[in-house]
Image (cartoon, coloured by chain):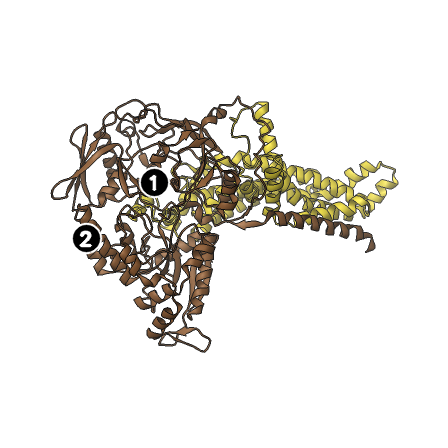
Amino acid sequence: MRYVLRRIGFYCVAAWASLTLNFLMPRLMPGDPASTIFARYRGQLRPEQLEAMKEAFGFNDAPLIEQYFGYLSHAVRGDFGISISAFPSPVTTVIGSGLIWTLLIGITALVISFVLGSMLGIISAWKRGSKLDNIFPPLLIFLGSFPFFWLAMVALYVLGFKAGWFPLRHAYSDRLTPAFTWPFISSVISHLILPALSIILVSIGGWVLGMRNTMINVLGEDYITLASAKGLSTRRVMFHYAARNALLPNMTAFGMALGFVLGGQIIVETVFSYPGLGYLLIRAVSNLDYPLMQGIFLMITLAVLGANLIVDLLYVRLDPRVRGS
Amino acid sequence: MFKRTPFFSLLMIMMLILAACGAAVTPTTAPSVATEVPAVSGNTDATAAPDAKPTAVPAVEATAVPAVEPTADTSGSADALKDYLTASTEQQATWVRNFNPFVTDRRFPTLYGIYEPLMVYNTIKGEIVPWLATEYTWSDDNKILTFTIRDGVLWSDGKPFSAKDVAYTWNLLKSNTALVTGSSAWTYLDSVTATDEKTVDFTFQKVFTPGVYDIMNQIIVPEHIWSTIEDPVKFTNENPVATGPFTEITLFQNQIYGVGKNPNYWQAGKPYIAGMRFPAYPGNDQANLATINGENDWAGNFIPDIEKTFVAKDPNNGYFFPSAGGTVFLYLNTTKAPFDDVNVRKAISQAIDRDQIVAVAMYDYTKPADATGLSDAYPSFKSQAIVDAGDWTTLDIEKANAALDAAGLTRGADGIRTTTDGTPLKYDLNVVSGWSDWVSACEIMSQNLKEVGIDVTVKTYDFSAWIDKVNKGEFDMSIGWSTGGATPINFYRGQMSSATFKPVGEVASENWHRYVSKDMDALIEEFSVTSDPSAQKAVAEKMQEAFAAEAPAVPLFPGPMWFEYNTTRFTGFPTKDDPYASGSPFSTSDQLLLLTTVKPK
């Protein structure tokens, strides 16, 4: 219990630190949002309108410290304010337009990649030197080292555009209205395959390698030899004795990755026109949209912290040694 | 070691396969700047992402295969939009519902599509088309402008439109200074009043006749709706009531929305099309892929090598890129020597190979700029005589060298010129990273200027950093756009008047090069007090002469306005042979001409 409380305390401090950084970082960037958005109109708006925009966006020249406390109290209440680049829509509405799709593609790809990658890692470590072990890990690492946008684009061009097997864009058919019906769900799935596949191809190598390496270490331990000597089944030794212990580092990485899912799969979402958060984040940064940036970054940091907390708590279950200390 | 051999051979095979794939794809870089050079008078909806990184566009070589929608179910209501025209205008990954015409991030076609102005200004023909108003007259002292409102116009909810709505809209803008519009009319207007149901008077504080273009261009909102809105600045106007051809939001999803026709449109029988639908494309590449694939009927995006990649694919495909966008300039910071010397500026201009820039950086979509600095948007004002006489915008290395020698900038041992106090002419040329057409133009200029002994390094900045530097005048050389408008007055005001001048360090959204011409100030004043078109034309010629003589900045090329169409499902788009409007879907008022002309096939 003390362990759990200590962890929670640590995460509270980390959350405060990230909130503060989140406030400061955007304000260190050059320029101001009104001038940037104004400039995007390339001489279409009259200079006098710059003042109107500043007024509309409600920039106050209050001292930074005052702005900071205002920001903190709003953040605690979950009020991120009004987005500047999508003015006058609230940040929550803007984030809401892409959140669910980012979660869908991010989590699907991550879970498949993690489960499949860890399984492959376990098996290839167990059967060291086999054909499987010789082919898969290096091949996947090789794929993972490709520039991501290139791989995604080749997939889109060859499988989507040329062959016409997969849709070219979006999360579901433009001809459908979201509803809990089979045509809609199958449309979502068919739109998910190509983007998810390209994420999995690129990320799976890391999971395989991570799992395989720790697994090999664990397999050298005495208790594995003992377990085998006791005559336990191969499967039981492999999963309950070796894999359970080897999984810990990968679990941590999984927790981190889960948090980062919220940042959006920027490249994949852009290439496949997937309506997620990744592009919103780019737009927020390039328009100096502080409220939107803060909203998204805060979500990411909180998600990373939250996921890590969960992993920490899971450790308590997975690893009795943690409980002891 | 040897155990691994099969695997290396496998790697080699994989590499070969992938290399072959790579060769087939041949990515071309797409200048994303081009995605949104709306650059004409009035407002624009173009809040797309001009700075989206230019990733590669798969150059399409094979025939386009229609994308398969594996589950083309027709039961959803989104499918009811199948008769709609599909358009690609703004670039966003997801749509946020907002049809407020007074904020910057509104969905197309809020301006000049849902809402309408009193009169439409046709950029291509340079003429005024009466719209919600039938005519305007000036009082004898040019201080009162009177518009006569058209009979029989209804709002889309069936209520009648009147002069009161016009006066209401203007007074709404006066009392809510945070509302963003395309004009600054309240800086010279005194009052706007509806004298009866059909007439509205605009009274000026001081005579400013070019204001008529600002006034006619302003879209009008209904008093009976907007007077009930508590804070118009924060109003997202999800279901607009308006006078335009398209007013009904028939569908709004995060990746697509549709706008249906106005049941009460005042032009009987129009619009001919049932509505328009807008799929969300996050960038130029994705929009172009759809356009090339025949999915968009109307688009306004830069497409590289368009004859080969788009026109050759389908006889129904066409494009029209009028050079009527704002002129793109090389700005020299005139607060710094030697750029304060007109002869040096002209010499730099003469050293630049505009033909090469136009051909290489701009795919021949535009043409070299001339010494008036004006784009093709001013057919009724531009003087051919001044264009012909202005020799400093044509390439002439010898003259450039001679002028630089005469200015006392002698070449050092390394071939680089130095000022009289020995400082070498070494400068950074600022450009936005990712705007590859501009970056490419800058690379060419850097080469050109080396030939005359000026060492120029192209320096790319992120958009917000770049705009911060030019706004504050903290640069030596920078490429940049220029201001448009129905008359040349805004353009010249932005180039060389004291009204737009700000000291270095203060934000100036025009006149980045910090140049003031007293002559131009006087001409602008002279232009502003007459409502006689021929007198205005004469003054405009003097303005062009002043620009050509003083060369405050170096014009490069007029910006093309992007517009592609596909006539498989719809006809009646403007074409090179029938340029009845600009066609570019970037919310200039003349898009109303297109929207009320296009027909289903």
Q: Position of residue B446 (x, y in %)?
A: 45, 63
Q: Which residue is rendered at x = 33% and y = 57% of the image? A: B370
Q: Position of residue A161 (x, y in %)?
A: 59, 38
Q: Quadrant of residue B403?
A: bottom left
Q: Position of residue B273 (x, y in %)?
A: 40, 28
Q: Which residue is mark 1?
A: B588
Q: Quadrant where the N terminus of chain B lies? A: bottom right
Q: Quadrant where the C terminus of chain B lies? A: top left
Query: Amino acid type of disc 2?
Result: Glu
Query: Amino acid type of disc 1?
Result: Thr
Q: Which residue is mark 2?
A: B525
Name the foreground residue: B272 vs A289.
B272
Mark 2 surroundings: few (<14), some (14-19) or many (≥20) residues within 10 A: some
Q: Is residue A298 visible?
A: no
Chain letter for yellow? A
Q: Quadrant of residue A172?
A: top right
Measure the alpha-carbon separation of dots 2 and 1: 27 Å
Q: Position of residue B375 (x, y in %)?
A: 33, 51
